[in-house]
Image (cartoon, rainbow, N blue to C red):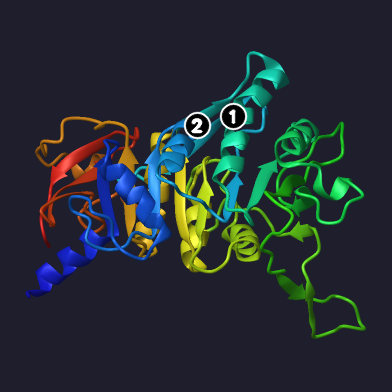
Amino acid sequence: MSAHAGISEHRMLCCHELYLQPPEHLELLASMHSAHPPWCPGVDAAIDAVLIHAAATDAIAWCIDAGLSPSLVYIDPPYASHRDYVFTQTHPADGSRVARVAFGDRWDGGMDAYIDMLRPIIEGVHELLTSDGSFLLHVDPRGAPYLSILCDQIFGMGERLPEKNARGFRNELIWSYGLGGSSPTSWPRKHDNIYWYSKASQWYFDPPMTPATSQRMRGQMKKQPDVIAIPTINNMAKDRTGYPTQKPIELLQMLIGAHAPAQDLVMDFFSGSGTTALAAFQTGRRALVSDMSDDAIAVTRDRLVQAGARVAVLRPQPLQDETPSDEPDLNALVFEAFGAIDAAGCFVSCQEHEATHRRVRDIDGVETVLPHRVP
């Protein structure tokens, strides 16, 4: 085998692009329960992470059809914040910043419409989970009390009841993130709420440990309390993707390590920047995540591929004509450091185990299909 052939084979194991047509996509999804590759065109190795380019309700329905049962579902949905969130990128030609709206978090029907959106998603999560599985709902104080009641209705009241180990509510975690602005008319808002629910009266939990701060326990480790102090990602951080609402990898590594056994399946139906999938891969779990946003899927895909994960992207339909186009002006492209795929990244389409073409995203987020060329 030539050196070029070896490089090509490695990259083909990194990322595959398939469209949501049965039975192939159900075979691929079902394979997430095992370490064996699915029977799918162009897929010849076990997949570390599956990305579904679809709404949460659709992704959940496909997972149910495939018989998947994750031990942990974490979601960080919109917060009913009544604002637009902006995705920023750096143009490779001149270093200028380009921004566009990643998603709008506005609800014409107010809090009722917001809760109605999340109800079927949380019901689907409850159906998916293993019998000892856990659900983590990450929200902010605006919707937290309403969603806590909704989860009590679906999962059970748990620790709010006198019975020991009743199913449902286990903990409210506080993520204290520290950074950010403040208002002159109110206390600075510096925390999010993370609600932990168990599907049944038994659950998996491996308590994370943190250095003790008291003099009595100096130099020892203690259990992490339910207030988690991890700074949010600052504007100069190397791992910042430009995608809004990105959470620090340390937070997701802690949550996944505590609530999902090694090698188990973790799901997230509001993938955003892909931190859940990346943290699952880095901690030895498999991930299945979904998002409606083109940018979210692209950013998640790129972070996973750059980390060495084997990724499959499932889309409801082709984004454009799959015939490779002529090479465009390279100065117009956003390269992998900013969330794109080029010849130095992964090849996303295969036929008979041979890479055929790749995708490159321009500064407006439009992906162009290009011919595959081995360096």
Is disc 2 placed on a helix, strand or loop? helix
> Is any atom of residue 267 visible in this view?
yes
Of the residues shown, which amino acid type is indicated by label 1?
Pro
In the rendered image, residue 138, in percent from the top left (x then y), is placed at: 67, 44
Quadrant of the drawing holding the C terminus: bottom left
Quadrant of the drawing holding the N terminus: bottom left
Reading the image, the residue beneath label 1 is 120
In the rendered image, residue 169, in percent from the top left (x then y), is placed at: 78, 47
Residue at x-position 64% and y-position 23%: 116
Q: Residues within 10 Å of mark 2 (few under 14, many from 20)?
A: some
Mark 1 and mark 2: Cα distance apart in space = 7 Å
Question: Is disc 1 in contact with disc 2, using a CB cutoff of under 8 Å?
Answer: yes
Residue at x-position 18% and y-position 53%: 42
Classify 97 as above or below 132: above
Reading the image, the residue beneath label 2 is 57
Q: Residues within 10 Å of mark 1 (few under 14, many from 20)?
A: some
Residue at x-position 86% and y-position 56%: 164
Classify 269 as above or below 346: above
Pick the residue in front: 70 or 227. Answer: 70
